[in-house]
Image (tube, rainbow, N blue to C red):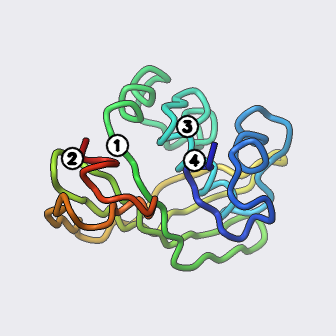
Amino acid sequence: MICPCQNNQAESANQYKDCCELIHKGLSKADIPETLMHSRYSAFALGLGQYIFDTHHPDYRNGTVEDYQKSAESTEWCRLEVLDSETKAGSGRVNFKAYFIEKDKLHCLHETSNFVHEAGQWYYTDGDYQPKMIEKISRNEPCPCQSGLKAKKCHLK
């Protein structure tokens, strides 16, 4: 299975088992905020509410594991685009765009996320949002997830 984060920097050509699954299963840790961002995006795309909850800093959480699970399952995520990232001692920021589809419209969540490193682990804290962009998806255009299929054969089935 292709990893939802589509991290083209990974040597393994985006295989989930070699990418975010290792972090989701606790076999490795995110070493920088950008890696945590990729793993959290994949967790949202796969509906892994417990992982999303566990990697959200306890001081910033707003809900239960079930709330995070419902949020992840209710959205059809299709692509992550990391624009830039910065890591400093104990903190970091990731500027990204996450795309999701709702009915026949492509939505873009543009955020600069903040992260902290505590007790050997990176945590998401909060983020600064840009205005959300929405555009209609044409059924005969390439799917925004970049699968190579037309939208009508992919996310607009």
Residue type, mark 3 in image = Ile
In the image, residue 43 lies at what x, y percent?
A: 56, 40
Q: Which residue is mark 2?
A: 102
> Could you tell me how far apart the alpha carbons at marks 1 and 3 are, in whole angstroms?
16 Å
Disc 4 versus disc 2: nearer the observer: 2
**Picture coordinates of residue 96 (x, y %)?**
47, 69
Residue 137: quarter of image: bottom left
Pointer 3 and pointer 4: residues touching (CB < 8 Å)?
yes
How far apart, in angstroms, are the residues tagged by discs 4 and 2?
20 Å
- Is there CB contact under 8 Å for labels 1 and 2? yes
In depth, the one of 128 and 3 nearer the eye is: 3
Task: Check whether the beta carbons of the residues at disc 4 and disc 1 lie within 8 A of each other.
Answer: no
Q: Is residue 8 left or right of residue 102?
A: right
Query: At x 31% / y 48%, what residue is drawn?
Result: 153
Q: At x 49% / y 69%, what residue is drawn?
A: 81
The residue at which mark 3 appears reads as: 52
Q: How many marks overall? A: 4
| Image quarter of the N terminus | top right
Q: Residue type at mark 4: give it.
A: Arg
What residue sits right under mark 1 in the picture?
A: 76
For the point 47% across and 42% down, the residue is: 45
Cα distance in 3D space between marks 3 and 4? 6 Å
Other residues around mark 1 within 10 Å, as few (<14) / some (14–19) / many (≥20): some
User: Dot 4 lies on which element?
Assistant: helix
Q: Amino acid at mark 1?
A: Glu
Given this view, does label 4 or label 1 mark the residue nearer the observer?
Answer: 1
Q: Amino acid at mark 2?
A: Glu
Q: Label 3: state its secondary structure.
A: helix
Q: Earlier in the sequence, mark 4 or mark 2?
A: 4
Placement of the C terminus among the 4 image quadrants: top left
Q: Does residue 60 lie above or below 89 as drawn?
A: above
Residue hosting label 4: 40
